[in-house]
């Protein structure tokens, strides 16, 4: 039987686990909202609410108890002067957990731990940073774009010429070869003339007239 062993070890040693909780508490008290895994959020929630309950009574001893977990004076000051007074009339339940589903990568169940009175505000987008191309264009007075356009035009012209040459070659290969003559009957006559032997005196013996 497992007695007096409440809580999850999270596959970490005791010192590592306590240091992780200390960092997460500091982030939660500073930003009032953190994103972590669901298991870690369940372990961190009662610890954070316990510290808020302790901070309702502002004294030296309570400040020291909070400072054991959050060794940052600015964060401890915020807990006693800002966070704890907001929950004076609330007996508990200062935080809530919002499930986000499995996260990309390890498919761990992600969650958000935040205070119940947290108001989400959409941040304005920062101005777009100037890229290297924009910087070069501004430095050269727009000559970069002109050079790029000229290169693109020359490349398109070369591609057009190559396509025309390929088409002409295809047409020549597809069309039948024409004879040197006028074609038709003339072509047949030319072939017959080439095949017929030449007429002339025989070289084998003397002619009849001479005999």
Image (tube, rainbow, N blue to C red):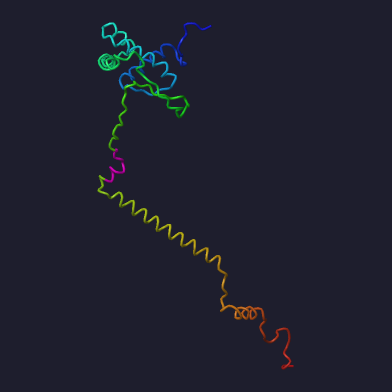
Q: Is residue 200 above or below residue 78?
A: below
Return the x and y of residue 59 as percentages of the image width and height: 26, 7
Using the rendered image of the protein, determine whether residue 20 is visible from the camera's viewpoint: no
- Residue drawn at x 48%, y 27% as measured from the top left: 107
Return the x and y of residue 88 as percentages of the image width and height: 29, 14
Seen in the image, is 66 located left or right of residue 39? Answer: left
Identify which residue, 69 or 156, lies in the foreground. Answer: 69
Q: Which residues are magenta?
A: 128-137
Using the rendered image of the protein, determine whether residue 84 is visible from the camera's viewpoint: yes
- Residue drawn at x 42%, y 17% as measured from the top left: 42
Screen quadrant of the C terminus:
bottom right
* Secondary structure mostly seen in the magenta stretch: helix
- Residue drawn at x 30%, y 16% as measured from the top left: 87
Q: Is residue 73 above or below residue 33?
A: above
Seen in the image, is 183 located left or right of residue 41? Answer: right
Return the x and y of residue 82 as percentages of the image width and height: 26, 17
Return the x and y of residue 45 as percentages of the image width and height: 39, 16
């Amino acid at each position: 039987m497992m007695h007096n062993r409440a809580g999850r070890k999270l596959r970490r040693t005791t010192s590592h686990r306590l240091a992780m909780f200390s960092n997460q508490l500091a982030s939660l008290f500073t930003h009032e909202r953190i994103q972590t895994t669901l298991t870690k959020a369940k372990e961190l929630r009662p610890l954070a609410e316990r510290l808020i309950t302790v901070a309702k009574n502002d004294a030296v001893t309570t400040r020291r108890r909070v400072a054991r977990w959050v060794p940052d004076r600015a964060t401890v000051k915020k807990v006693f002067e800002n966070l704890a007074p907001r929950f004076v009339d609330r007996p508990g339940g200062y935080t809530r957990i919002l499930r986000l589903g499995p996260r990309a990568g390890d498919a761990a169940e992600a969650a958000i731990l935040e205070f119940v009175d947290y108001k989400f505000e959409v941040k304005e987008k920062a101005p777009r940073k100037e890229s290297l191309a924009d910087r070069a264009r501004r430095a050269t007075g727009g000559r970069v774009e002109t050079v790029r356009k000229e290169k693109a035009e020359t490349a398109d012209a070369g591609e057009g010429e190559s396509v025309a040459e390929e088409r002409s070659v295809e047409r020549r290969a597809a069309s039948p070869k024409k004879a040197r003559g006028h074609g038709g009957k003339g072509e047949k006559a030319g072939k017959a003339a080439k095949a017929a032997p030449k007429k002339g005196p025989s070289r084998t013996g003397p002619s009849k007239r001479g005999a």
